[in-house]
Image: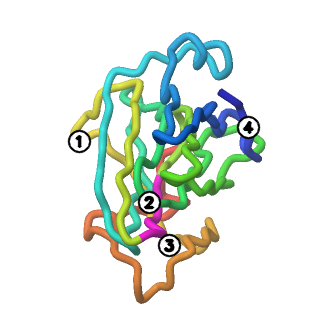
Amino acid sequence: MNLIKTAIEGVVILEPRLFRDERGYFFESFSQREFEEKVGNVHFVQDNESRSVYGVIRGLHYQLPPYGQSKLVRVVKGNVLDVNVDLRKGSPTFGKHVAVELSGENKRQLFIPRGFAHGFAVLSTEVIFQYKCDNYYAPGREGGIRFDDPELGIDWRIPPEDMLCSEKDRQLKSFRECFVF
């Protein structure tokens, strides 16, 4: 596994070693030992999967302490723009975001530590999106930021008329009103 740093400390891209031949391909999608060596000691307790269609924007979500979650995300089919906003008060990148394209083709994974709001936009016709979490989902302890908050200036790479967003996500607070870690 190759580790690629992003512009925000702690958010890293993991690129697997891919073995291809005439039968197809094989790669190790997760190794606890290698993850700890390259990223750190994170114990994942829950795996999630979603299916979405072109134009869907999910997020920007986080869970309030003590239920915060680190995530390891990847795309099985299709491609997304994965966006993470730093909510760690005192961080030199507080309020900044990093956006990474993940696809079934590039097989990259993205690790997002606790203290970030996370979301993604579906750039392909369909996407199958998977993520590991290091804490269980806690209903009632959710937080979020509006995906279209102008202060964040996120280019979701979807024309506004094609954006599909849940009513719940449209009701999220602005960055200025959100919880900070």
Quadrant housing the C terminus: top right
The percent position of residue 117, horizontal first and vertical second, equals: 50, 48
Mark 4 or mark 2, earlier in chain: 4
Give the magenta range: 119-124
Query: Of helix, strand and loop, which one carries label 4?
Result: strand
Mark 1 or mark 4, earlier in chain: 4
Q: In this figure, which residue is indicated by the disc labeled 4?
A: 4
The percent position of residue 64, horizontal first and vertical second, equals: 39, 37
Q: Indicate left or right for 10 with 134 as reference.
A: right
Residue 126 appears in the rendering: yes
Q: In this figure, which residue is indicated by the disc labeled 1?
A: 140
Check contact, mark 1 vs mark 4: CB within 8 A: no
Q: Indicate left or right for 23 with 101 as reference.
A: left
Q: Using a 10 Å C-alpha cutoff, classify the residue at mark 1 as few (fewer than 14 neighbours), some (14 to 19) or many (20 or more).
A: few
Q: Quadrant of residue 170?
A: bottom left
Q: Is residue 169 magenta?
A: no
Task: Give the label on residue 148, or none.
Answer: 3
Residue at coordinates 49% horizontally, 24% vertically from top-left?
30
Residue at coordinates 57% horizontally, 74% vertically from top-left?
157
Q: In this figure, which residue is indicated by the disc labeled 2?
A: 78
Mark 2 or mark 1, earlier in chain: 2
Mark 2: amino acid? Gly
Residue 171 appears in the rendering: no
Mark 4 or mark 3, earlier in chain: 4
The residues bearing labels 2 and 1 have C-alpha atoms spaced at a distance of: 31 Å
Pair 1/3: label in front: 3
Pair 4/3: label in front: 4
